[in-house]
Amino acid sequence: MATFLYKLGRFAFRRRRFVALIWVALLAVAGVGAATASAPAADSFSIPGTEAQRAFDLLDQRFPGANADGATARVVFKAPEGESMKDPANKAAVERTVHALRSGSSQVDRVADPYAAKALSKDGRTAYAQVSYKVTGFELSDTSKDALKDAAEDGRDAGLTVETGGNALQAIPETGATEVIGIAISAVVLVITFGALIAAGLPLLTALIGVGIGVSTITALSSTLDLSNTTSTLATMIGLAVGIDYALFIVSRYRAESTDGREREEAAGRAVGTAGSAVVFAGLTVVIALVGLTVVNIPMLTKMGLAAAGTVVIAVLIALTLIPALLGFAGTRALPRKAPKAPKARKGSETDEVHGPDAGAEERPNMGTRWAHFVLRRPVAVLLTAVIGLGAVAIPATSLELGLPDDGSQPTDTTQRKAYDLLSDGFGAGVNGPLMLVVDGRDAHAGESVKSAAARVAKKVGGLDDVAVVTPPTFNRAGDTAMLNVVPKLKPSSVETEDLVHDIRSTTHAIAQDTGAKTLVTGTTAMNVDVSQKLNDALVPYLALVVGLAFLLLMVVFRSVLVPLKAALGFLLSVVAALGAVVAVFQWGWLADVFGVEQTGPIMSMMPIFMVGVVFGLAMDYEVFLVTRMREAFVHGERPGEAVVTGFRHGARVVTAAAVIMISVFAGFIGSSDSMIKMIGFGLAIAVFFDAFLVRMAIVPAVLALLGRSAWWLPRWLQKLLPNVDVEGEGLRTQLADTDAGADADSDDGAADAGNAREAARI
């Protein structure tokens, strides 16, 4: 592989105009596709194979025109102090608002009048009108949304407090200025790392091109493939992070090769042949983790994973082709201003044989070298400190509560959150998350009717604890299906309401055995229960698939059994610690003000398995980049401890810069107005911090120091089975050395060329 990538890098450098033109054309085509595409689809929370989804499907079949998946809105009215919603003036204002809602848009299906539906609070001060639409929230036209807002203004003009909630108001999440700050921090880190604006700008430029192609493609296909705005946001998040990191490693290696005195085209080829191999396998681990999300069988999660994986593939291809092409355009401006003079090595020393004249014993140690020596002297202390520290941070994860976001998680200054609070105060928190029961009487026993079965269900369920109200059943035209609404006493995200879902299902199951009429439970809380169960069931198979495939991939890369095992265990430690931090902030409320968390509550149901997928792939990035350099040194003859030091001397600075960049990119999304995006950004940022600086920079060298040569052990039978992909560039090194040696025979300056041949051993 290294030889192929070496040739690819030289080709891209030499044919840079052709390569650049291809990528510009791809960006233009994707941009045109995005500009001409129809509006993005709504977020899909369908969960195939669950009771909640079967209930929705049954409603669509038996209640045609009911629009079970259509957008809904609740317009909540509250009378001033000392007045009632039954007062003639207030009642007239509500009726005008209801009329305005019905006539405001052709997308409105029906509007429930508060007085006809008896949607008035006991104290008479609060009422609400339920609005149902024929289309989903993201398919609502601007006219429909404006009509909803104007109707609310009519009520306010009459002196009422009017707020609107529901998914009809869902909009594209706003990330705010913090996303731009994240990119700015990345630019500063790159400038500090390279000391040159051109070299620092290349990773940013190529990452933005890659994200532009990826996100534009997603936008162009959003209507066809039912891709949501959340999918684009995730692709942007992942694409920026890995795009900058992968380009950073190629540019860094190119500068190192150029500093050693090689021609620019040769330096580009060697950079892609060595660092490019690590980029390919690091990208493969990320892709495996993201594509593996398909095993969960939740459409929204699957689409998010596949779209992000596609963006990662683009980032890898850009790093391997566009980066060397742009380095060709940059000329010497991408190189260090002053190349450091190579220290004189001891003649005949092993260091000279392995690394060339610029890696002698007199080389001044950098921060990475000093840290590696520190860890090698105290491996047990470093290992215990890092493991205990991460274990302590992981403790809150034992209190993890899962749920789905609702209007109660919105910022307190939004109309959705105000409507949620008004309903909770006037009717009880449970009215914000009613359960829906669907009684299917087609298979009822002889002599049983759906009416009698529905009546039994209403009576039994109404007698359960934590049930506030059970509405009378509504029957379809065929008379074989009934629909009831159950209002819990407590808020939708409470543990008691989740337990109520299980109690209702147990109760109705017993009725189904007696009557043959099956009852299905759905609604936000029921969906939450089913999603959580589905994710829990899928977690073990997902881990087995992703970790298993990545373990095999890392065995191929490192030609070792223990190094991939250590990498997987370190990842598990970092992801559990990250989940603990997410629970502490978003569920317990620690430092909530710092991160702009206005409402604590359950963690998003998909967060654990999503973090496992994304963080595993990103964690393996640093494992591959850092340990590949150690493997390279070990293969070239260094002792295990020396190989660890060499890996840190050449890789620690770049890996640190890459981690800071990735953290700043992810942290930029903490400023999003969407609670889900905010949680994802924080979770990924803290996970990368733990994995890069505690696991890869502390635990990895400590474990390698304790294992010694056994870290690189691989059974002979396995050596024969595994393909040799030459990630460390041994085959390329030999080939280039032979080429240089052949040139020596025809050169009048054989001694100088022999020195260059020894320098080729540094690959």
Image (tube, rainbow, N blue to C red):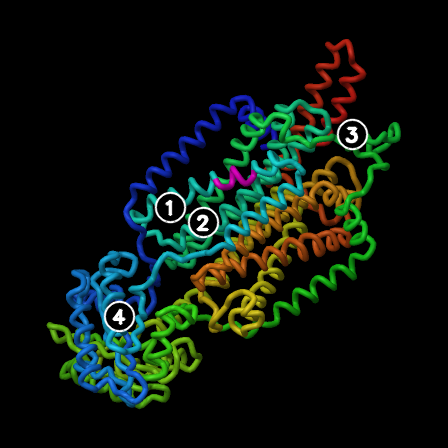
Residue 117 sits in which quadrant? bottom left
Q: Earlier in the sequence, mark 4 or mark 3?
A: 4
Residue under pointer 4:
152
Tell me which segment is drawn in magenta.
203-208
Q: Amino acid at mark 2?
A: Ala
Q: Residues within 10 Å of mark 2 (few under 14, many from 20)?
A: many
Spatial distance from mark 2 to mark 4, Cα to Cα?
36 Å
Q: Mark 4 or mark 3, which is nearer to you? A: 4
Picture quadrant where residue 249 is located: top right
**Dots 4, 1 in contact, CB < 8 A:** no
What quarter of the picture does the N terminus occupy? top right
Disc 3 packing (10 Å; few <14; some 14–19; many ≥20): many
Q: Earlier in the sequence, mark 2 or mark 3?
A: 2
Dot 1: element: helix
Label 3 sits on residue? 356
Disc nearer the start of the sequence (2/4): 4
Q: Which of marks 1 and 4 precedes in the sequence?
A: 4
Residue on which disc 1 sits: 218
SS at mark 4 in the image: helix
Q: Provide residue 113's location: percent of width, then percent of height.
A: 18, 77
